Image: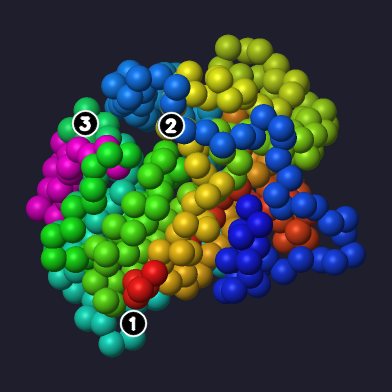
Amino acid sequence: MAEYWRICEKNNPRTQKNSSLPAIDPDARPERDIPVHLTPEKPAQAESKIVSKWNQSDTVYVAGDGFKRYWETLEEVWRYQVMMISGGRCYMEHTFSFFPENKRLSDLTGLIIGCNYGKDTSQTAIARSNLFKELTVVDIAEDLLVRQKALTDELGFGHILNFECLDLNKDHLPQKDGYDFIHAWGTIHHIERLEGLFSEINDALLPDGIFSMREYVGPSCLQFTDQTVSLVNRILSTIPDPFKRDEHGKIKTESWHPTRNEIVSDDPSEAVRSDRILSIAEKNLNVLACSMTGGTLLNPLLHGIAGNFEGTEEALNILKMIILFEQTLIDAGVISSDYVYLIAGKKYDP
């Protein structure tokens, strides 16, 4: 991720490094982090596995009893993310502030890459802005799209939001007459054909349109660095046992650090070329801003036990300390950020 610092330093003061701290090679990766292709399985088998998982994406992050497994499901983490994206300002207002000053912000058309299930999702947040006359949501998981469409109709946004089933590893983005806004949240790291996708995003943008994405851009196939695993293990050793129990009561004693085979077996598309996202995005788009949003330590640390870090003052204070520690290391340049929020405009002759 050598390009990570270079891209983010252009517009984000949080990326300034402290030269007095130990130098960390941003390209350092475990030996197991070798180039990959989408899957060694047959394409049809891989696609079926991916679709099956993400048709029930809401159960991936939260257990049936409501226990939260994933770091981003926590309210305090969301506040942290908004602070890193926009300094605490509504992140959509922040994003829309990058439209040209003379652009008429009404009756806009938008494209949303990736569908989330629920009443409070990025697609419903964009619909609630009252700036759009039409929003098209594309995703590989057809059952998820059907469920979210039904919920969207209940919320009264059915006249704005349309849903289309596409596999962006083989299907092309709908171009239509161009879009004022294209948004992606947590989906592009599942795409192998990044060059084609970002080229299509640039082509699909109107001349005064903008693109935004919140993405995992860390090591491919979630092959976390030895440094990350070591830091997470040290933090875990200081946390009392009651906060380290998973949904089955087992105490977590070490960082989540799945093997490549485990990741591919669960989801062949997971972070398939995540460490190339930023460089390919910059090549194809005019990057306007890139904010580091962390997750480097929080993701592997809270994996499977996130639900323990809310509900009591003690739990919340522990989480706040972990967030502060991660943020401090990122600000100082000791670790890079595995997640970013990027805003870009149309690039001519990319």
Q: Residue at x 87, y 59 (%)?
A: 21
Across and down, in percent, residue 159 comes to 10, 53
Across and down, in percent, residue 145 comes to 22, 36
Q: Amino acid at mark 3?
A: Glu
Closer to the camera in the image, 193 or 84: 193
- Which label's residue is closer to the chain start, 3 or 1? 1
Q: Point out which mark residue 38 bears.
A: 2
Q: Point out which mark residue 218 bears.
A: none
Gap between marks 3 and 1, in whole Å? 35 Å
Q: Residue at x 30, y 42 (%)?
A: 168
Span highlighted in magenta in the image: 148-168
Q: Residue at x 41, y 64 (%)?
A: 284
Across and down, in percent, residue 215 comes to 48, 49
Residue 322 lies, with reference to residue 47, above or below; the image says below
Gap between marks 3 and 2, in whole Å? 20 Å
On the image, numbered disc 3 is attached to which residue?
142
Q: Residue at x 44, y 26 (%)?
A: 39
User: Which quarter of the figure is the C terminus placed in?
Assistant: bottom left
Residue 29 shown left or right of residue 144 in the figure: right
Q: Is residue 151 magenta?
A: yes
Circle 2: element type: loop
Q: Amino acid at mark 2?
A: Leu
Residue 240 location, quadrant? top right
**Residue 63 appears in view:** no
Residue 210 shown left or right of residue 336 in the figure: left
Marks 3/2 in contact by CB < 8 Å: the verdict is no
Residue located farthest toward the left when viewing the structure as drawn:
159
Tell me the mark number nearer the camera, choosing from 1 and 2. Answer: 2
Closer to the camera in the image, 153 or 168: 168
Residue 148 location, quadrant? top left
**Residue 123 appears in view:** yes
On the image, numbered disc 1 is attached to which residue?
100
